[in-house]
Every structure is written in structure tokens, then in C-alpha cells.
């Protein structure tokens, strides 16, 4: 499994978090990894780091989404788009391992594969704004 597929699996786990109470995250992880037969330890570690990091910073991430998606409340947003944005914003703002451009590109690719026709542009716009703000503050 390559990094793109590992990120896709991290997205699946983040997506599932929205439908399960936060206090059931341990059970969710266990169920998720029980279903993944062809995964090595490095891939599991990457997926866990991404999902746990997203969960840890969820409140801050959701505030950023609300600030940038002015005409969209989080409740009106597609759960798929929300999960993609959460994961990408975690990578951009809280993980030093992934270049901004890679995080944005991978998020757009996830949107193309799993969301609506309009989602890639929507996600690209929000993430582009966050990257722009982040690079100006450096």
C-alpha cells in the first residue's frame, strides 16, 4: 500500500468518526483495523497518526472550516467533504510531515473519487485559503 492509499484509509477512519461517539474511538479503530488484512505496521502507524491527530485537533479544525466556509455551516456540509477537509487541515496545520501542496492535492483527489462533482473546487478553495493564511504568517 502506498501513501495515497494509506491516506484514503485514514479518510475512511475520520469519516466514520462523525457517525460514532467520540468516546467510542478505540472500538472504531479496532473494528477498522480488523477489516484491513493487507496492511503493514508503517501503514497502520500513518493511518493512526492521521486519524488520532485529526480527532485531537477536531475543535480547532472545525473552527477553521467554519471561518473559511462562510456560507456553509458544518451541519449543512456533506459528511464526506467534512472528513476530507478535517484530514487535510490536520495535515496542513498540525503535521509537519506533509507539504501543503501534497495535502491539498490529495484532498482534491479524495473529493473527486468519493464526493460530488462540485466538491473538488469547494475543498480546493477552502484549503487554498488556509494555506495562503498559513504561509503569510510564516
Image: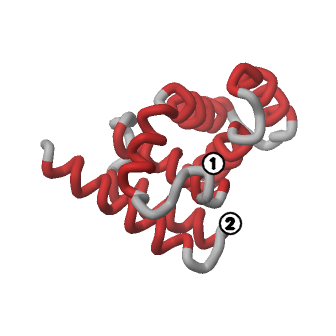
The structure residue drawn at horizontal position 61% and vertical position 37%, both measured from the top left corner, is 47
Determine whether 132 is above or below 95 in the image.
below
In the depicted view, which residue is nearer to us: 43 or 22? 22
Name the quarter where the C terminus is drawn. Answer: top left
- Residue 118 % position (x, y): 56, 77
Determine whether 1 is above or below 59 in the image.
below
In the depicted view, which residue is nearer to us: 136 or 64? 64
* Other-residue count near label 1 (Cα within 10 Å), few / some / many at <14 / 14–19 / ≥20: many
- Residue 125 % position (x, y): 38, 67
* Other-residue count near label 2 (Cα within 10 Å), few / some / many at <14 / 14–19 / ≥20: some
Q: Which residue is mark 2?
A: 114
On screen, residue 11 versus residue 98, left or right, reads right
Residue 86 visible (yes or no): yes
- Residue 44 % position (x, y): 66, 33
Spatial CA span between label 1 and label 2: 10 Å
The structure residue drawn at horizontal position 48% and vertical position 32%, both measured from the top left corner, is 59
Q: Identify the secondary structure beneath mark 2.
A: helix
Determine whether 86 is above or below 106 in the image.
above
- Residue 131 % position (x, y): 28, 54
Q: Identify the secondary structure beneath mark 1.
A: helix
Determine whether 84 is above or below 91 in the image.
below
On screen, residue 69 versus residue 84, left or right, reads left
Q: Which residue is mark 1?
A: 11
In which image quadrant can residue 19 be found?
top right
Asked if marks 1 and 2 touch (Cβ < 8 Å), the reply is yes
The earlier-in-sequence mark between 1 and 2 is 1
Colour theme:
secondary structure
The structure residue drawn at horizontal position 58% and vertical position 66%, both measured from the top left corner, is 111
Residue 1 visible (yes or no): no
Which residue occupies the extreme bottom position in the image? 117
On screen, residue 33 versus residue 47, left or right, reads right
Amino acid at each position: 500500500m502506498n501513501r495515497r492509499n494509506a491516506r484514503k484509509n485514514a479518510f475512511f477512519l475520520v469519516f466514520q468518526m462523525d457517525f460514532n461517539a467520540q468516546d467510542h474511538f478505540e472500538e472504531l479503530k479496532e473494528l477498522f483495523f480488523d477489516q484491513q488484512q493487507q496492511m503493514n505496521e508503517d501503514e497502520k502507524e500513518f493511518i493512526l497518526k492521521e486519524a488520532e491527530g485529526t480527532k485531537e485537533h477536531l475543535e480547532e479544525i472545525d473552527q477553521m472550516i467554519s471561518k473559511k466556509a462562510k456560507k456553509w455551516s458544518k451541519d449543512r456540509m456533506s459528511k464526506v467533504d467534512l472528513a476530507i477537509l478535517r484530514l487535510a487541515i490536520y495535515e496542513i496545520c498540525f503535521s509537519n510531515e506533509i507539504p501543503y501542496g501534497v495535502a491539498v492535492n490529495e484532498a482534491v483527489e479524495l473529493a473527486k473519487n468519493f464526493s460530488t462533482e462540485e466538491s473538488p473546487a469547494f475543498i480546493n478553495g477552502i484549503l487554498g485559503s488556509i494555506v495562503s493564511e498559513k504561509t503569510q504568517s510564516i
